[in-house]
Image (cartoon, grey):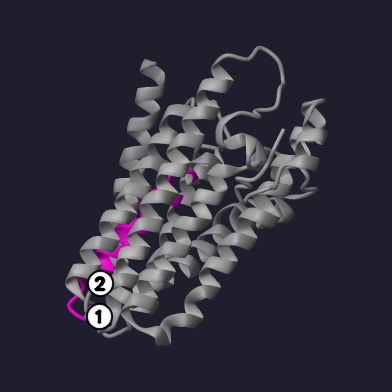
């Protein structure tokens, strides 16, 4: 426990240094658009965390990036003098984003075992490389940069709503907030159900109860639903932002094509009862009409 707390302290210091570097990078482009500055700072932060992962020989440095950095970026965007979005909408969006970020960060913290642990997906992906160049492409490109660009695209609806003048608070904002809160609660419930399940099993076995009865990855359903809620916030601000749905679609592709396929393949190899479960249960979307 002491070792884990020590390692978490190192992570906190590393991310505080990363945030400081983002603020410095932001100041280098005073005349640029907020959309551009968010992208540059997002990529710079990715490079910063990548270097830490290289130094510590552990790509799981990037795990906390997913939940921490979007909050920092949107606050930087909102506090910029050029931001012209509706203040009430900005507060509501940030409340939803913070709720999502706290849940995701907490779930990572309680499952992370310290620097002795690295996500099995990272280990598998890097293990398939044959030389240092391939290793770099996979480690920096596939594990760090591509997810960052996907999150940036999914975050664009909120950035646009913060950057440009929009409608007053309306029913679409209420719908967006409802979807965001519902999404996070789906994640909280599914996370806790899986956490309890893993504590009480002694051999590889498939989780088939609770929300996991209706979906193989209900936590991912909540994740996609949350990013979709940011798109609804953008629509509430201006219907001309409808094209920003592309961000949600990109996030769906990242999760459905990359993460789900890897996790299902691993489960098929490790759990004898997973094939039947897979054949009768949707990958992401919750099938409330499923019957035993």
- In the rendered structure, the answer to whether residue 238 lies left or right of residue 66 reads left
Q: Is residue 43 visible?
A: no
**What is the span of residues highlighted in magenta in the rendered image?**
63-83
The secondary structure that most of the magenta stretch takes on is helix
Give above or below for 143 relative to 151.
Answer: above
191 or 110, nearer to the observer: 191
- Labelled disc at residue 30: 1
Q: Residue at x 50, y 49 (%)?
A: 222
Residue at x-position 32% and y-position 39%: 12
Residue at image x 37%, y 64%? 176
Up-down: is 147 above or below 164? above
Estimate how packed mark 2 is, as few (under 14), some (14 to 19) or many (20 or more) residues with alpha carbons within 10 Å: few
Give the camera-side residue of 4 and 178: 178
Secondary structure state at the residue bearing disc 1: loop
Question: CB under 8 Å between callouts 2 and 1?
Answer: yes
Q: Can you identify the residue that label 2 sits on?
A: 27
Relative to 111, 252 lies left or right:
right
* Quarter-of-image position of residue 278: top right
Q: Is residue 1 visible?
A: yes
Residue 20 within the segment the image draws in magenta: no
Q: Relative to 18, is 194 on the left or the right? A: right
Expressed as whole percent of the image width and height from the top left, the position of residue 96 reads 31, 55
Q: Position of residue 20 (x, y in %)?
A: 27, 55
Q: Position of residue 121 (x, y in %)?
A: 66, 41
Instruction: For the N terminus, give its image quadrant.
Output: top left
Measure the alpha-carbon separation of dots 2 and 1.
Answer: 6 Å
Q: Is residue 68 magenta?
A: yes
Q: Residue 214, located in which quarter of the rendered image?
A: top right
Where the C terminus falls, by quadrant? top right
Give the residue drawn at x 29%, y 47%: 16
Query: What x and y, as percent, mark residue 86?
Result: 21, 76
């Amino acid at each position: 426990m002491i070792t884990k707390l020590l390692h978490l302290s190192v992570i906190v210091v590393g991310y505080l240094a990363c945030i400081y570097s983002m603020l410095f990078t932001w100041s280098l482009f005073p005349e640029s658009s907020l959309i551009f500055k968010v992208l540059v700072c997002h990529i710079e932060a990715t490079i910063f965390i990548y270097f830490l992962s290289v130094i510590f020989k552990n790509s799981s440095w990037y795990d906390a990036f997913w939940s921490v950095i979007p909050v920092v970026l949107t606050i930087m965007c909102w506090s910029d003098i050029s931001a012209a979005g509706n203040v009430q909408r900005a507060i509501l969006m940030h409340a939803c984003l913070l709720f999502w970020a706290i849940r995701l960060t907490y779930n990572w913290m309680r499952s992370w075992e310290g620097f002795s642990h690295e996500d099995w997906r990272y280990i598998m992906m890097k293990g398939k490389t044959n030389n240092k160049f391939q290793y770099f492409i996979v480690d920096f490109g596939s594990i760090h940069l591509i997810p960052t660009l996907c999150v940036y695209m999914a975050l664009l609806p909120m950035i646009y709503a913060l950057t440009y003048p929009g409608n007053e608070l309306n029913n679409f904002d209420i719908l967006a907030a409802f979807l965001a809160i519902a999404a996070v609660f789906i994640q909280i419930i599914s996370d806790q159900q899986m956490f309890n399940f893993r504590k009480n099993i002694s051999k590889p076995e498939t989780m088939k109860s609770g929300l996991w009865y209706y979906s193989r990855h209900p936590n991912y359903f909540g994740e996609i639903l949350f990013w979709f809620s940011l798109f609804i916030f953008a629509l509430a601000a201006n219907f001309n932002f409808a094209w920003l749905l592309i961000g949600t679609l990109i996030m769906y592709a990242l999760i459905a094509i990359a993460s789900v396929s890897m996790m299902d393949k691993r489960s098929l190899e490790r759990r004898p009862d997973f094939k039947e479960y897979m054949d009768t249960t949707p990958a992401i979307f919750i099938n409330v009409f499923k019957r035993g």
